[in-house]
Image (cartoon, rainbow, N blue to C red):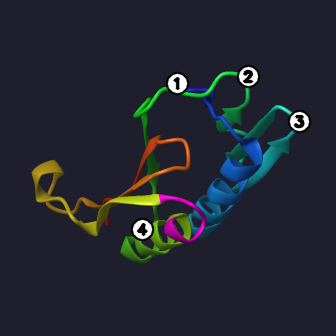
């Protein structure tokens, strides 16, 4: 149903460093790059980050990424912290969302809330 999702960022190079690391830990990669946009995915560009000349508002959204297991959640969370992200909830079980719901939360360099989740 969803073809792609896009988010505006203030500094595309800074966002690329952050998302290159996070998506690599999840088995995805950069699939498109131009002066004003970058897209990531596995089989095609699905998640886009663009620069439009205006910064995003604080706390402007929530993006949840699927991970293959708890080790991938841990690795993506660590990669995000090492590349300019801020912790917004350490990886761990979140039983209020389901008995096998394991997630970690970050804020990307622009304040977007990023969740990395495994249901395994």
- Residue at numbered disc 1: 1
Quote the CA–CA distance across marks 2 and 4. 32 Å
Query: Magenta segment, which residues?
Result: 81-85
Magenta residues, dominant SS class: loop
Camera-near label (3 vs 1) is 3
Q: Is residue 82 magenta?
A: yes
Image side of residue 61 versus residue 10, left or right: left
Between 48 and 53, the one lying in front of the other is 53
Between 114 and 57, the one lying in front of the other is 57
- Residue 64: where, in percent of width, then height? 42, 45
The residue under the point 67% across, 35% down is 48
* 4 or 1: tag closer to the N-terminus: 1
Disc 4, SS: helix
Disc 1, SS: loop
**Disc assigned to residue 70:** none
Quick check: 22 above or below 98?
A: below
Q: Residues within 10 Å of mark 4 (few under 14, many from 20)?
A: many
- Residue at numbered disc 4: 73
The residue under the point 64% across, 65% down is 21
**Disc assigned to residue 35:** 3
Q: Are marks 2 and 3 in contact (CB under 8 Å)?
A: no
- Residue at numbered disc 2: 53
Image side of residue 5 versus residue 81, left or right: right
């Amino acid at each position: 149903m969803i073809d792609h999702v896009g988010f505006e960022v203030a500094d595309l190079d800074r966002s690329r460093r952050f998302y290159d690391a996070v998506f690599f830990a999840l088995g995805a990669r950069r699939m498109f790059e131009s002066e004003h946009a970058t897209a990531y995915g596995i089989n095609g560009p699905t998640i886009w980050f663009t620069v439009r000349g205006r910064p995003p508002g604080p706390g402007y959204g929530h993006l949840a990424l699927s991970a293959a297991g708890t080790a991938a959640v841990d690795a993506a969370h660590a990669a995000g912290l090492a590349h300019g992200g801020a912790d917004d909830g350490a990886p761990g079980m979140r039983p209020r969302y389901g008995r096998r719901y394991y997630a970690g939360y970050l804020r990307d360099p622009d304040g977007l809330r990023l969740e990395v989740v495994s249901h395994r």
